Each structure stands twice: as structure tokens, then as C-alpha cells.
């Protein structure tokens, strides 16, 4: 009996954490605590099982981890440093920066990317790597500056993920007007549900409630013809759009 109670308690805590991560109404936590353990089971079948997984990280977010500043030499870094010493090519600096970025050694990656850009102003890979590095460090303003340079060269870089990353950096840096303008460019050229959701949210924050609602409806409408694999991938943002509409008194058939 004690084991069953312990398992039920662990399950309830898990559902409470899921509830907070999904930003569901706080009443669910009260229900789960008061109606232990029935409330947690009800939450699981009512919300979690239908809500899909939490969103996967964006291209930039995928590299956001604790910075490891201590350098650990590898055959790859030693070889790249040797090539740099011989040829001083932007390509080798950029590759060394990418190696440090992959190892989460951000402080070491930054000067390599900057040197690559200085030697080749059109080094798209180095500008993108620099933007990712600053983003991973939580330095969204500098990340935006690096991506701005890239977007001036190629607006479609990385299939639109670069300009999408720029919009995200503006939003997280608190530059809402720039974020709105850039999100608009993204959704006009690329079909990113996350971009459309944040664009609508920013419109709402700016007091443009009706337009925000229309954008959320557009997001949901666009999901109707998605293949199953794509629908599952975008499920989180679709569900969030439904939640936004319900909170604003809009019910869709």
C-alpha cells in the first residue's frame, strides 16, 4: 500500500510540473492536490495526453547550455590551429569556432568567428555561428547584431531559420517593434507556426487584440491540411493558439 501511495504521489508531482510548464490554469494543481490521486489522472487524460509534447528547441535554442570556457585540445582543434598558423584563412577560423561551439566553449568560439568575419565579410557560416554562440550565452542583443549582418547578405539562409532566429533574438531582447517587423517577414515567406504564434502574441501585447485573434485563427486554419508527421511537430503551437482563443472568448467549431 505504501508503494502505491508513493507512486501516486510521484505521478501527481509529475503532472503538476507538466501543468506549470504548459502554463495551464492553476486550478488544475488545486484539483490534483485536493482530489489526490484522481485529479492527477484526470489531468493526464484531459490535458497531457491530448496536448502533445512540449515544444522542441529552435535552431538557436538547441545550442543553449552552460558555457565551458576551459579549453580541451583535440586532434581537430590542433589540426585547425596548425592550418591557421600556415594559411590564416577565414575558413579555418570559422571551423575552429564551430568546433568550440559544438563543445559549448562559447568564450573560445567568439574570437574565432569574429576573426573569420574580419577576413571574409561574406562568411555566412561565421555570422550564423556567432549569432548562435551569443544566443547560447543569453546575449540576445549581440546575437541579433550578428544575425542582422547575415540577413543583409542572405535573407533565406538556412531555409529561413536565420531570419526566424533574428526575430526570436529581438523578442527576447525586449525589442518588440523590431521583433514584430521581423516576424512578419518570416511568416510572409516561411511557414513557421512558432513564428506566427509569437507574432500574434506581440500584437496582443501591443493592444491589437482583433488582429492577434485573426492570426491565431490563421495558424489553426493552416494546420488543417498538414500531413500527420508535420501536425505532430507543430501540435504544441496549435494547442497554444486554441488556448489563446478560448481565453479571449473565441470558440472554434
Image (cartoon, grey):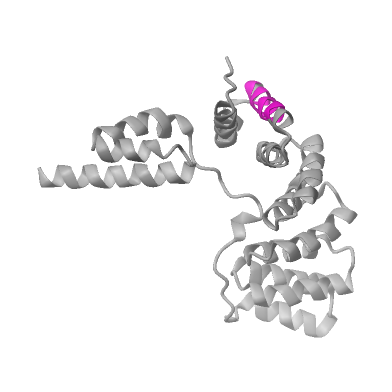
Name the main secondary structure of what is drawn in magenta. helix
Picture quarter containing residue 107? bottom right
**How far across and how far down the image is residue 183, in percent?**
76, 43
Residue most extreme to the front: 207
Residue most extreme to the top: 253
For this view, does 9 lie left or right of residue 190?
A: left
Q: Quadrant of the C terminus?
A: top right
For this view, does 43 lie left or right of residue 198?
A: left
For this view, does 195 lie left or right of residue 104?
A: right
Q: Quadrant of the N terminus?
A: top left
**Is any part of residue 1 visible from this angle?**
yes
**Segment colored magenta:** 213-224
Picture quarter containing residue 64? bottom right
**Is any part of residue 96 visible from this angle?**
no
Point 87% across, 74% down: residue: 118
217 falls in the magenta region: yes
Amino acid at each position: 500500500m505504501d508503494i502505491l501511495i508513493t507512486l501516486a504521489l510521484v505521478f501527481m508531482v509529475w503532472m503538476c510540473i507538466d501543468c506549470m510548464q504548459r502554463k495551464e490554469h492553476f486550478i488544475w494543481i488545486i484539483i490534483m492536490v485536493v482530489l489526490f490521486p484522481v485529479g492527477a489522472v484526470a489531468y493526464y487524460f484531459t490535458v497531457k495526453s491530448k496536448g502533445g509534447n512540449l515544444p522542441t528547441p529552435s535552431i538557436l535554442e538547441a545550442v543553449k547550455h552552460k558555457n565551458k570556457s576551459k579549453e580541451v585540445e583535440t586532434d581537430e582543434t590542433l589540426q585547425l590551429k596548425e592550418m591557421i598558423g600556415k594559411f590564416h584563412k577565414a575558413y579555418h577560423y570559422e571551423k575552429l569556432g564551430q568546433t568550440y561551439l559544438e563543445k559549448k566553449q562559447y568564450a573560445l568560439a567568439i574570437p574565432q568567428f569574429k576573426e573569420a568575419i574580419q577576413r571574409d565579410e561574406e562568411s555566412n557560416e561565421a555570422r550564423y555561428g556567432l549569432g548562435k554562440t551569443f544566443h547560447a550565452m543569453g546575449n540576445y542583443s549581440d546575437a541579433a547584431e550578428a544575425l542582422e549582418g547575415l540577413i543583409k547578405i542572405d535573407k533565406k539562409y538556412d531555409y529561413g531559420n536565420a531570419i526566424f532566429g533574428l526575430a526570436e533574438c529581438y523578442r527576447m531582447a525586449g525589442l518588440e517593434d523590431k521583433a514584430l517587423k521581423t516576424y512578419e517577414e518570416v511568416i510572409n515567406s516561411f511557414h513557421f507556426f512558432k513564428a506566427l504564434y509569437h507574432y500574434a502574441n506581440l500584437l496582443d501585447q501591443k493592444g491589437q487584440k482583433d488582429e492577434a485573434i485573426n492570426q491565431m485563427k490563421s495558424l489553426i486554419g493552416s494546420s488543417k491540411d498538414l500531413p500527420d508527421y508535420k501536425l505532430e511537430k507543430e501540435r504544441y503551437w496549435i494547442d497554444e493558439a486554441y488556448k489563446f482563443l478560448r481565453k479571449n472568448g473565441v470558440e472554434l467549431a
